[in-house]
């Protein structure tokens, strides 16, 4: 689908490069806005509850900055996509690593092991106020990850900015992925099929 022919405007409420990549692959043109919320201030015991609460908090932070006014009644719909993701390892929620040491610890744990990503996607129709949110879960199984690969990943630095230090699309880590039960785009933070369905449902 060509983005410029879509009958609505699209805002991705995320600064994440992988999410931008996934949405562009879906054929959409969009603008990005970052919510800039204190994610650590929102705590939930269940990962599913946490990612959904964060997606909602991001939408609540972005919407007031959009200056939506009465004139929107005649305008084309404007949709806002907000999302969040955590990695779950042995029942524990993992967010972005605090530092290089924690990133190494995380990756070491995945070696010969498994982890899961739990993602939320919330699509809000800013013209009608209608919103739909859902969760997606993917399980990732790893071969042994060599120490020198961990060194390179940490030195390169991208792992410090993603949930659980987990980047399965990274060329350095790809050879050590044994199996992915679910969609790679979901691990990148934006499950395509789910996002497309939610967009359709709020229009």
Image (cartoon, rainbow, N blue to C red):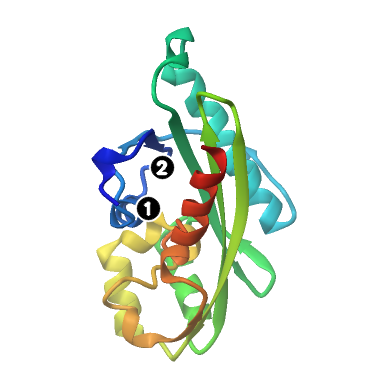
Residue 189 in the figure: left or right of residue 170 = right
Q: Quadrant of residue 160?
A: bottom left
Q: Quadrant of residue 78?
A: top left
Residue found at the very far right of the displayed protein: 45
Q: Nearer the viewer, residue 161 or 32?
A: 32
Residue 162 in the figure: left or right of residue 203 = left
Mark 2 / mark 1, whichever is N-terminal:
2
Measured as percent of width and height from the top left, residue 192 is found at: 44, 59
Secondary structure under tag 2 reads loop
* Image: 28 above or below 107: above
Measured as percent of width and height from the top left, residue 3 is found at: 27, 44
The number of numbered discs placed on residues in the rendered structure image is 2
Q: Nearer the viewer, residue 100 or 109?
A: 109
Q: Nearer the viewer, residue 101 or 40?
A: 40
Q: Mark 1 sits on what residue?
A: 19
Q: Residues within 10 Å of mark 2 (few under 14, many from 20)?
A: many
Residue displayed at 51% across by 23% down = 127
Tags 2 and 1 touching, CB below 8 Å: yes
Secondary structure under tag 1 reads helix
Q: Mark 2 sits on what residue?
A: 14
* Image: 127 above or below 131: above
Q: Residues within 10 Å of mark 1 (few under 14, many from 20)?
A: many
Q: In whole angstroms, how far apart are the C-alphas of marks 2 and 1?
A: 8 Å
Measured as percent of width and height from the top left, residue 72 is found at: 44, 15
Residue displayed at 25% across by 48% down = 2
* Image: 183 above or below 190: below
Measured as percent of width and height from the top left, residue 157 is found at: 30, 61
Residue 47 in the figure: left or right of residue 82 = right
């Amino acid at each position: 689908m060509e983005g410029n022919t879509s009958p609505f405007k699209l805002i991705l409420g995320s600064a994440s490069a992988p999410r931008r990549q996934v949405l562009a692959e879906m054929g959409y043109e969009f603008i990005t806005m970052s919510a800039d919320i204190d994610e650590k201030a929102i705590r939930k015991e269940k990962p599913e509850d946490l990612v959904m609460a964060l997606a909602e908090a991001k939408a609540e932070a972005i919407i007031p900055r959009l200056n939506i006014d009465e004139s929107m009644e005649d305008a084309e719909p404007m949709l806002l996509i907000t999302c969040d993701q955590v990695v779950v390892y042995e029942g524990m929620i993992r967010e972005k690593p605090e530092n290089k040491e924690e990133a190494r610890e995380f990756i070491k744990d995945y070696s010969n092991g498994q982890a899961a990503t739990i993602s939320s996607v919330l699509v809000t129709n800013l013209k009608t106020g209608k919103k739909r949110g859902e969760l997606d879960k993917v399980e990732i199984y790893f071969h042994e990850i060599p120490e020198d690969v961990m060194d390179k990943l940490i030195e390169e630095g991208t792992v410090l900015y993603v949930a659980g230090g987990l980047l399965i699309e990274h060329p350095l880590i790809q050879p050590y992925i044994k199996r992915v039960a679910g969609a790679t785009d979901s691990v990148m933070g934006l499950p395509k099929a789910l996002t497309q369905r939610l967009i359709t449902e709020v229009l």
